[in-house]
Amino acid sequence: MTIRLGPNRYGKAECRLVTVVRDGPRHELTDLNVSTRLAGRLDATHLTGDNADVLPTDTQKNTVYAFARDGFASIEEFGLRLARHFVAGPIDRAQVHVEAYGWRRLGGHSFARAGDEVRSATLTATAGQAWAVGGLHGLTLLNTTGSMFKGFPRDQYTTLPEADDRILATAVDARWRFATLDVDWNAAFAAVRQGLVGAFTDTYSRSLQQTLYAMGERVLRQVPEVAEVRLALPNRHHFLVDLSPFGLDNPDAVYFAADRPYGLIEGTVLRDDAPLPGLAWDLGAA
């Protein structure tokens, strides 16, 4: 029997940093969570404990903070610069994942956290190529009508009634792969978000799967730099409360918002001419 080392990587997870640009009385705030992952010729540290090729994760953390000092126009630009920096010597692949937390301006130097929605970017680099994946999660959407679910198979375990009209709610977890690095990153993010929200709002939904496809299709039509969209949509169920024990009717007015269990709908929408993803999605392979 032969035993060998398989795919591996290492890095510094969740480097929290906040930057403030103090340009006069109106300050600009950026709140980030940055994780690095490096892979390459690292057999020795696993097999013999020789750390000659291991860039310390503490050094990776310090590099994140030092690069932030120079400023950046977008999280994609910041992550790409970091990823390319780490590709050197025995490290032939680097991935940087950045999450940006939103803050709502209250004044020139006052802010309030803008809810659960988080923008993200994952930048992967080798010596000769780089890939970008944008993302967001925690975008909570709800339609009070315009959704149905019926015509599904039934067996001895089926209790769910068919619904001609229902509340449809989800918390979007979306990632999209760019076909190019020649992108206005902030404008592209705004356009992708607008496409996701617009398709959710406009689609008469016969299933959450149908809505998922409509959201991905809208993004691909509106943002030509995007080649592929991956979506995970939890179905945030809302069940009509039975008020009859209290002598009351319930004309589709009062619902119980269940947090679990929930349906989870996942899918990918992509262009026929989408370039191969390379290492865009995952750095795990050797």
Image (spheres, helix red, strand yellow):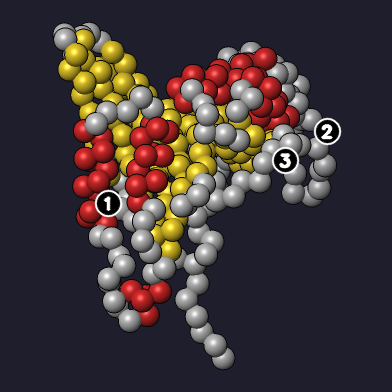
Residue pictured at 39% horizontal, 69% vertical: 42
Residue 80 appears in the rendering? yes
Residue 189 appears in the rendering? no
Residue pictured at 61% horizontal, 30% vertical: 226
Q: Position of residue 120 (x, y in %)?
A: 43, 35
Q: Nearer the viewer, residue 31 or 184?
A: 184
- Numbered disc 1: secondary structure: helix
State the residue position of label 3.
159
Question: Is 47 left or right of 275, judged from the image as shown?
Answer: left
Q: Position of residue 40 (x, y in %)?
A: 43, 63
Circle 2 or circle 3, nearest the eye: 2
To which quarter of the image does residue 96 belong? Answer: top left
Tag shown at residue 232: none
State the residue position of label 1.
60
Question: Is 239 left or right of 58, judged from the image as shown?
Answer: right
N-terminal-most mark, 2 or 3: 2
Residue pictured at 21% horizontal, 33% vertical: 69
Q: Are marks 2 and 3 in contact (CB under 8 Å)?
A: no
196 to 70, vertically: above or below: above
Name which residue type carries label 3.
Thr
Q: Position of residue 244 (x, y in %)?
A: 60, 22
- Numbered disc 2: secondary structure: loop
N-terminal-most mark, 2 or 1: 1
Q: Position of residue 277 (x, y in %)?
A: 61, 46
State the residue position of label 2.
151
Count of number-bearing discs:
3
- Residue sitting farthest toward the bottom: 1
Residue pictured at 39% horizontal, 60% vertical: 91
Q: Are marks 1 and 3 in contact (CB under 8 Å)?
A: no
Spatial distance from mark 2 to mark 3, Cα to Cα?
A: 14 Å
